[in-house]
């Protein structure tokens, strides 16, 4: 399993379509919310196609509902595959959660009990999805606000077992670890140290709303310092991992997001340089190491 | 130990405001469950706010919030995308006794939804005027016209479009009056267009969608126009449709 490093990306949101095309900002890739492009035409697909010509795109879903006890939605999977065929994404990801049951979609990312039964259930379904899509998917850890009494393992043990047994990859959201660590009083470093480093293929960073006794993952503010500190630890533990910043509300001017992304670079790149890690770069990628003298073995590989 | 399927049913039912036994299966019931329940309603509410901004302005906060709450209860989302959550709102309004004496409410909801449909409807190739001009006279009677997939025709009983335009521009809407009109909505390039149409154009479009050819259009439009003028009128309509980019393909 080769870990491909695509550099530093941003969420592709409609607020920035025109500016991205006009200015071609120094972003290595963009991530879309897959379901937003399950449409027949118009602006969403026009801008997606145009931006895809310039940038690699990752597909990030919110309704796979991999943990639901409803049957997997085959029509949904077909739409997902059709979109993937259209844009040849660098990643296809969704959340390690359930979003609905009984045919009803809550449109929220709901937690699972951390049990052997949940692991078996989810692993079987990830196998099916990966077979259907003919590629590995990434599953993302959640922010959560409740835990279940019957859970008999730590979240990171649950996540690790799922990704290992399903042979899928991990989208490790650093902000989500911080949010859940505060909400459920665990040490976020334990989480980072507890997941299989070789499967960590992507990071999310985002802001949240801090209400003191609890935090809600709102994606409406800049990344906070404690999350940057965790990201630094993640860079030390996992080496080069494609990283993107999610912003979904209270949208700032694009330059602010770009500055935030560049801050992520300034944290991670010096660490990657010191690690002198062998890193795999995609041939069609946009990422270039800042210094040509960086002692990294660069091996090229095609996307997909 | 509770089965995962039941746990999920209890959890979702709780989000929907039903009384369930979920509390006995979670730790941090407060504020955890409330955070999820609030998010459930807020997310669905925001989807409807986005799809029906002028309906909200017409009804005012109190009535719109009640409508939204009732809709969320009666029509929980079943689609993977929030894009489609509001698709049943017009039909839902039409069933509410409260709104049956106010047809503009359902018409405004339908108008906003149809504009939304045009926004991301499939695109297509567009028939070129040059191509039509090169056709010979003997080809015209059997010509058929395939219309673009974003085209919708709709009939209103009220001045809903004028009301919508005022609301959209944050202006006071005109008095609501009964005003039967026909409209088309379509997308030209990436821009959603609409215009009112006369009854003869409505008939011509309906027939065209059914596959009628040019001669048949002329024949049917004789109910609107004198026989010597009808061909000119149909050609005029076709020129307008070509200019509007309403015709996908001319089939000769």
Image (cartoon, grey):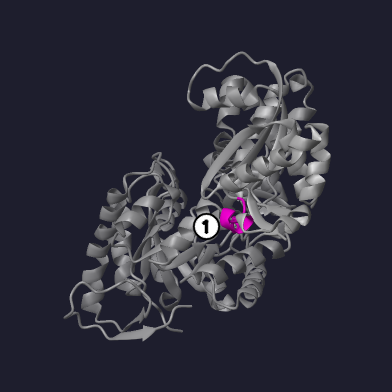
Question: Relative to the observer, which residue lies in front, A195 or B241?
Answer: B241
Q: Which residues are magenta?
A: B121-132
Residue A38 rendering spot, x and y as whole percentages:
60, 57
Quarter of the image holding residue A209?
Answer: top left
- The main secondary structure of the magenta stretch is loop
At x 65%, y 40%, the residue is: B236
Residue B69 relative to residue A211: left or right? right
Question: Relative to the observer, which residue lies in front, A12 or A66?
Answer: A12
User: Quadrant of the image for the C terminus of chain B?
Assistant: bottom right
Residue A274 rendering spot, x and y as whole percentages:
21, 77
Does residue B129 show up magenta in the picture?
A: yes
Question: Relative to the observer, which residue lies in front, B230 or B17?
Answer: B230
Q: Is residue B43 above or below residue A43?
A: above
Residue A260 relative to residue B173: left or right? left
Residue B135 rendering spot, x and y as whole percentages:
66, 58
Write down the residue under mark 1. Answer: A45
Question: Relative to the observer, which residue lies in front, A140 or B69?
Answer: B69
């Amino acid at each position: 399993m080769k870990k491909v490093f695509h550099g530093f990306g941003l969420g592709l949101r409609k607020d920035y379509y025109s500016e991205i095309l006009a200015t071609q900002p120094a972003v290595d890739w963009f991530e879309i919310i897959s379901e937003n492009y399950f449409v027949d035409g118009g602006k969403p697909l026009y801008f997606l196609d145009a931006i895809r010509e310039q940038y690699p795109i990752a597909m990030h879903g919110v309704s796979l509902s991999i943990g639901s006890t409803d049957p997997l939605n085959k029509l949904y999977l077909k739409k997902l595959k059709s979109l993937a065929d259209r844009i040849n994404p660098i990643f296809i990801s969704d959340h390690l959660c359930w979003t609905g049951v009984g045919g009803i979609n809550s449109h929220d990312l709901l937690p699972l009990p951390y049990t052997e039964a949940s692991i078996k259930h989810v692993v079987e379904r990830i196998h099916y999805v990966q077979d259907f899509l003919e590629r590995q998917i990434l599953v993302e850890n959640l922010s959560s606000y409740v835990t279940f009494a019957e859970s008999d393992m730590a979240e990171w043990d649950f996540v690790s077992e799922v990704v290992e047994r399903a042979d899928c990859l991990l989208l490790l959201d650093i902000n989500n670890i911080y949010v859940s660590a505060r909400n459920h009083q665990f040490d976020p470093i334990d989480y980072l140290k507890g997941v299989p480093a070789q499967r960590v293929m992507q990071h999310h960073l985002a802001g949240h709303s801090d209400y003191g006794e609890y935090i809600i993952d709102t994606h409406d503010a800049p990344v906070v310092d404690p999350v940057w500190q965790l990201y630094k630890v993640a860079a030390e533990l996992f080496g080069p991992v494609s990283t993107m910043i999610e912003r979904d509300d209270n949208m700032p001017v694009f330059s602010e997001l770009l500055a935030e992304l560049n801050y992520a670079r300034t944290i991670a790149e010096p660490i990657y340089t010191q690690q002198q890690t062998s890193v795999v770069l995609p041939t069609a990628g946009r990422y270039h190491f800042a210094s040509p003298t960086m002692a990294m073995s660069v091996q090229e590989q095609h996307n997909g | 130990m509770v089965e995962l399927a039941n746990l999920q049913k209890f959890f979702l039912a709780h989000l929907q405001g039903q009384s369930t036994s979920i509390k006995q299966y979670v730790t941090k019931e407060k504020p955890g469950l409330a955070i999820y329940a609030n998010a459930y309603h807020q997310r669905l509410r925001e989807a409807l706010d986005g799809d029906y901004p002028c309906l909200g302005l017409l009804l005012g906060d109190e009535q719109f919030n009640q409508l939204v709450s009732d809709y969320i209860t009666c029509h929980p989302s079943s689609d993977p995308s929030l894009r489609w959550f509001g698709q049943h709102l017009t039909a839902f309004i039409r069933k509410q006794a409260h709104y049956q004496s106010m047809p503009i409410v359902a018409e405004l909801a339908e108008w906003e939804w149809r504009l939304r449909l045009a926004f991301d409807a499939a695109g297509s190739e567009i028939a070129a005027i040059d191509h039509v001009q090169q056709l010979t006279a003997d080809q015209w009677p059997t010509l058929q016209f395939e219309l673009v997939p974003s085209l919708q025709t709709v009939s209103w009983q009220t001045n809903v479009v004028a009301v919508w335009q005022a609301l959209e521009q944050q202006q006071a809407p005109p008095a609501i009056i009964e005003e039967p009109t026909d409209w088309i909505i379509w997308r030209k390039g990436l821009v959603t267009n609409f215009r009112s149409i006369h009854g003869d154009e409505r008939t011509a479009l309906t027939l065209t969608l059914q596959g009628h050819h040019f001669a048949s259009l002329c024949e049917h439009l004789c109910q609107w126009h004198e026989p010597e003028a009808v061909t000119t009128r149909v050609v005029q309509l076709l020129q307008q449709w070509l200019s509007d980019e309403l015709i996908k393909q001319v089939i000769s």
